[in-house]
Image (cartoon, rainbow, N blue to C red):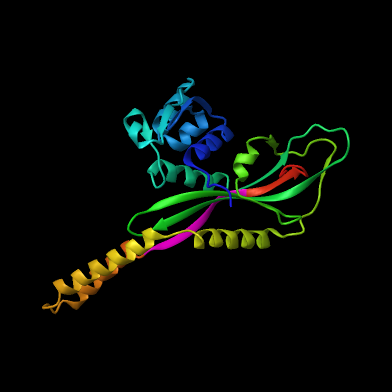
């Protein structure tokens, strides 16, 4: 399987796809000029925009500097897996771009076939002693079943648009979307199962230790209800679990040589 999508790649793809200019970029740091729509979506300034629009003035969207290197955290807004800003972006995508339908933009004179691909951008959540998230971008060819595990990185090299190009035609998928999603789910589960999960073993050990401490604390007490409540709370906090969610995805019609 290919490398997971890192935060910087995700942010670049998100903001450029929403017409925001990446004004500066260096290792662990990037400055983004928001559009009006992105400012309204992310900056929580409803009164500012209401005032600007009611007076007929031109509003000034914010410029943000995002930090992905903890050593530079004081140089801007530190964004990381689990941070409020990243969760806000996930929520925005879930509401506005859950499922897209786009075509590769090509200039051809002869009839050109476009094949259907199922794109899924997936967030894997690891919860236990520590919490972390991981992004995967997976593409599945709905004709021949080919998998690509760095789909968003590959899509950066081509141009997509909502209407099919002249002289192009599409073919119907042989693999249904529902079946494709099940295949992708199976691959994600395989990916997770093949990883080392030392964090989970540490979480289980810590859970045992804290449960024993609670039992010891209540051994001379008759407050069994309170003890059970504390055990439930520590179990909910430390019991390791892995879940994943599709942030967004879509059907893309791409040329036959896209995956080569």
Taking 258 as reference, is 239 left or right? left
Front-most of residues 47 and 204: 204
Residue at the extreme right: 110
For residue 85, above or below residue 133: above
Residue 247 is situated, as x and y percent measured from the top left of the image, at 53, 50
Residue 35 is situated, as x and y percent measured from the top left of the image, at 51, 28
Q: Indicate yes or no whether the magenta region holds residue 243.
A: yes
Front-most of residues 161 and 196: 196
Residue 232 is situated, as x and y percent measured from the top left of the image, at 29, 69
- Point out the stretch of residues depicted in magenta: 240-249
- What main secondary structure does the magenta stretch of the protein show? strand
Quadrant of residue 204 in the image? bottom left
Taking 218 as reference, is 3 left or right? right
Q: Indicate yes or no whether the magenta region holds residue 97.
A: no
Residue 189 is situated, as x and y percent measured from the top left of the image, at 54, 62
Q: Residue at 24% x, 67% y: name it.
A: 209
């Amino acid at each position: 399987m290919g490398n997971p999508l890192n935060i910087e790649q995700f942010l670049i793809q998100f903001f450029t796809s929403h017409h925001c200019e990446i004004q500066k970029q260096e290792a662990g740091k990037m400055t983004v000029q928001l559009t009006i729509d992105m400012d309204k979506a992310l900056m929580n300034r409803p009164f500012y925009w209401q005032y600007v629009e009611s007076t007929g003035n031109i509003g000034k969207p914010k410029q943000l500097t995002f930090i992905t290197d903890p050593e530079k955290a004081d140089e801007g807004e530190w964004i990381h897996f689990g941070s409020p800003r990243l969760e806000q972006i996930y929520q925005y995508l879930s509401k506005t771009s859950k499922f897209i339908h786009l075509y590769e933009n090509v200039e051809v004179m002869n009839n050109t076939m476009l094949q259907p691909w199922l794109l899924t951008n997936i967030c894997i959540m690891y919860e236990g002693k520590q919490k972390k998230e991981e992004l995967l971008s997976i593409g599945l060819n709905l004709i021949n079943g080919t998998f690509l595990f760095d789909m968003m990185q590959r899509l950066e090299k081509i141009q997509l648009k909502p209407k099919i190009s002249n002289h192009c035609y599409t073919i119907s998928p042989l693999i249904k979307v529902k079946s494709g999603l099940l295949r992708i789910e199976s691959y994600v589960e395989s990916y997770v199962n093949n990883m080392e999960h030392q964090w989970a073993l540490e979480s289980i050990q810590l859970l045992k230790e804290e449960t024993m401490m609670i039992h010891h604390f209540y051994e001379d007490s008759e407050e069994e209800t309170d003890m059970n409540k504390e055990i439930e709370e520590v179990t909910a906090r430390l019991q390791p679990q892995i879940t994943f969610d599709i942030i967004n995805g879509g059907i893309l019609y791409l040329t036959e040589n896209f995956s080569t």
